[in-house]
Amino acid sequence: MEVAARTAIALLLALAVLCGGAQGRHHRHTKHTRHNSAHAHAPSHSQAPGPSSARRHARPVSPPAPPPSSYPAPEPAPEPASGGAAAVYDVVKDFGAVGDGVADDTDAIKTAWDTACADDGDGVVLARAGYSFLVHTTVFTGPCQGSVTIQLDGTMVAPSDPDKWPANNKRNWLVFYNAHGTTLRGAGLIDGKGQNWWELPCKVHKGQGGSSGHGTSCDSPVMLRFFTSNNVTVQGLKVQNSPEFHFRFDSCRGVHVSGLSISSPQGSPNTDGIHVENTQDVLITDTAVSNGDDCVSIGAGTLNVHIENVTCGLGHGISIGSLGKQGTRACVANITVRNAVIRHSDNGVRIKTWQGGSGSVSSVSFENVRMDAVRNPIIIDQYYCLSKSCENATTAVFVSGVSYAGIRGTYDARSAPIHFGCSDAVPCTNITLSDVELLPASGQTVDDPFCWNVYGNATTPTVPPVACLMDGVPGNYADHTSLKCY
Ligand SMILES: *[C@@H]1O[C@H](CO)[C@@H](O)[C@H](O)[C@H]1NC(C)=O
Ligand SMILES: *[C@@H]1O[C@H](CO)[C@@H](O)[C@H](O)[C@H]1NC(C)=O
Ligand SMILES: *[C@@H]1O[C@H](CO)[C@@H](O)[C@H](O)[C@H]1NC(C)=O
Ligand SMILES: *[C@@H]1O[C@H](CO)[C@@H](O)[C@H](O)[C@H]1NC(C)=O
Ligand SMILES: *[C@@H]1O[C@H](CO)[C@@H](O)[C@H](O)[C@H]1NC(C)=O
Ligand SMILES: *[C@@H]1O[C@H](CO)[C@@H](O)[C@H](O)[C@H]1NC(C)=O
C-alpha cells in the first residue's frame, strides 16, 4: 500500500477511536489480523495488507432471494473470479460495524471500501448475513488499485427520515464514482426506506394535476448511483423502497445487471427500477421489477443495451425516454428487449419524446414480450408532456427502425393497445410489426390502433389489425435523416 493511503487510513482509524469505543477495538483487531495475514494467509498477490484474507470467505451463504414472480429465476451468484486470492474485508470483524440497524455504520463500511480499494489485488468487502447496516449517504470512490467486490449477504438500510439527510445532499444515497470493475452482489437486501419521501407534499401524487413537478425542494435520493464507472456488475440482490430511482447508471461503459429483485409499492412516485443514461454496453438479465414508475428507463446518450429475461409489474413498463426535453439533443441506438413479461402496468414497451428536441432513436428491437393486462402495450408518444400546455414544435427526436416481434398477451381495454403518435414535423419511419397478438384482458376489443405520421409495415397479420401504417418514407425524409446520430 502507498504510504499516503496508509497514512490516510491511520488517520481515519484514529478519528474512529476518538469517536467511539467499537472503532477502537476495530483498530487493534485490524492491526492484529494484518499481522496474521502477512504470515499465515498471505494472498497470492502478496503485499496486500488484507485484515483477514482467508480464501473464499466471500462465497454467498445462501442463494439469492427469489424475485416476486416465478419467472425468471435468478442464477445463483457465481464464485469470485478464479484464483481465490481475494482479500476479505469483513465490515463487522475488521472494521467495527455494529449491524444492529440502529448504530451508524457508514464509517465502518466506507473505511472497508477505502482499504479494499487501496489493495492492489482483488478485495472483497464482506457484509455478512444476519446483520442490518444503517448507512448514511456515501460516495464509494475509485479508481481502485484492484477490483473491489462488495458481498452483501446482510441488509443495508437508509435513514428513513428525510430530515436526517444533509440539506444540500438529498439526491443520492450510495454512489459509486470512478469505481471501475466494481461488483456489488450477494443474497442480501438493500432498503431505501422511501415511504416518508413518497409522502412529501411536493410529490406529484396519482390523481393530482401534476403541475408542481419535482423541483429542488423535492429532491429525493436515488438509491444506487453508478457514475463514470466502467465494467460494473450488480448481481443477486434484493433492492426495495427507493425514495426515487432504485438504480441509476450514468456515464458508464460496461454494465452488467443480473438476478436482481427490485420492488416498491404500486404508485410510489419516480421509483424507476433501473435508469440508464449516457452509458454504453449494458446487459440486464434475469431481473424482476415491481414498482411505481418505469421498470427500466433509457435516457439520452445510451448505446448498445440488451435486456433479456426481465419481468416488470405494476409500474410504467420499459421506456426509452423521455427524450428531447427543452430542445435538447438525444441519441439512443441499438436497444434490444427480449423475453420480457410485463404485468398490470400503464405501458408495455414505450418510446416517449417531447416536442422540440433533436437527435434520434434507432435500431430498437422488442422481441417476445408477454403482456398481461397492460394499458398501452405498444406505444410511441412524441407528444410527451407533463403539464397540459406543451406547444407543438417544428423539430423532434427522429424515431426510426423500431421492430416489434412476438408481442402477445392482453391489454386493459380502456385504450387501444397499439398507439403510434409521431411528430408532425418528423414522422417515425421503418416501424415494423410481426407476430403481434393483443387481446382485451376483459370486455370489448378495442381494435382501432392509433397512428399519426408513422411509416412502416406489419410483416405478418396482427391482432388487432394495423392498417394505419404508411408505406415507404415521407417526402422530406432526407431532411430527417440528418437528425440521425449514427
Ligand atoms: C472492461 O474490462 C475489460 C476486461 O477486463 C477491459 O478489456 C476493458 O478495457 C474494460 N473496459 C473499460 C471501458 O474500462
Ligand atoms: C448492439 O449491442 C449489442 C450489445 O447489446 C452488441 O453486441 C452489438 O455489437 C451492438 N451492435 C452494433 C451494430 O453496435
Ligand atoms: C434467458 O432465459 C432462458 C430460459 O431460461 C435462458 O435459456 C437464456 O440463457 C436466458 N438469457 C440470458 C441472457 O440469460
Ligand atoms: C399538436 O399536434 C397534435 C397532432 O397534430 C394535435 O393533436 C394537438 O392538438 C396539437 N397540440 C397543440 C397544442 O397544438
Ligand atoms: C429498419 O430498421 C431495422 C432495425 O429495426 C434495420 O435493421 C433496417 O436496416 C432498417 N431499414 C431501413 C430501410 O432503414
Ligand atoms: C416494410 O418496410 C420496410 C422499411 O420501411 C421496407 O424496407 C420493406 O420493404 C417493407 N416491407 C413490405 C413487405 O412492405
Image: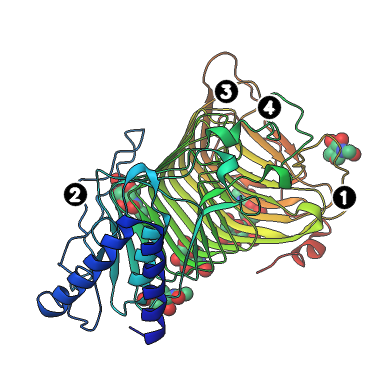
Counting other residues with Cα less than 10 Å from the Cα at mark 1, is it few (<14), some (14-19), or many (20 or more)? some
Mark nearest the camera among 2 and 1 is 2
**Identity, as a three-letter code, of the amino acid under mark 1:** Ala
Any mark on residue 61, and which?
Answer: 2
Disc with the residue nearer the chain's start (2 vs 3): 2
Counting other residues with Cα less than 10 Å from the Cα at mark 4, is it few (<14), some (14-19), or many (20 or more)? some
Mark nearest the camera among 3 and 4 is 3
Q: Which quadrant of the view contains residue 349? A: top right
Q: CA distance from mark 4 to mark 1?
A: 27 Å
Under circle 3, the secondary element is loop
Any mark on residue 393, and which?
Answer: 1
Q: Which quadrant of the view contains residue 310? A: top left
Whether pointer 2 and pointer 1 mark residues with C-beta atoms closer than 8 Å, the reply is no
x, y (%) of residue 77? 26, 54
x, y (%) of residue 248? 54, 54
Vertically, is 377 above or below 473? above
**Identity, as a three-letter code, of the amino acid under mark 2:** Val
Q: CA distance from mark 2 to mark 3?
A: 42 Å
**Identity, as a three-letter code, of the amino acid under mark 4:** Asp
Q: Residue reaching furthest left?
A: 40
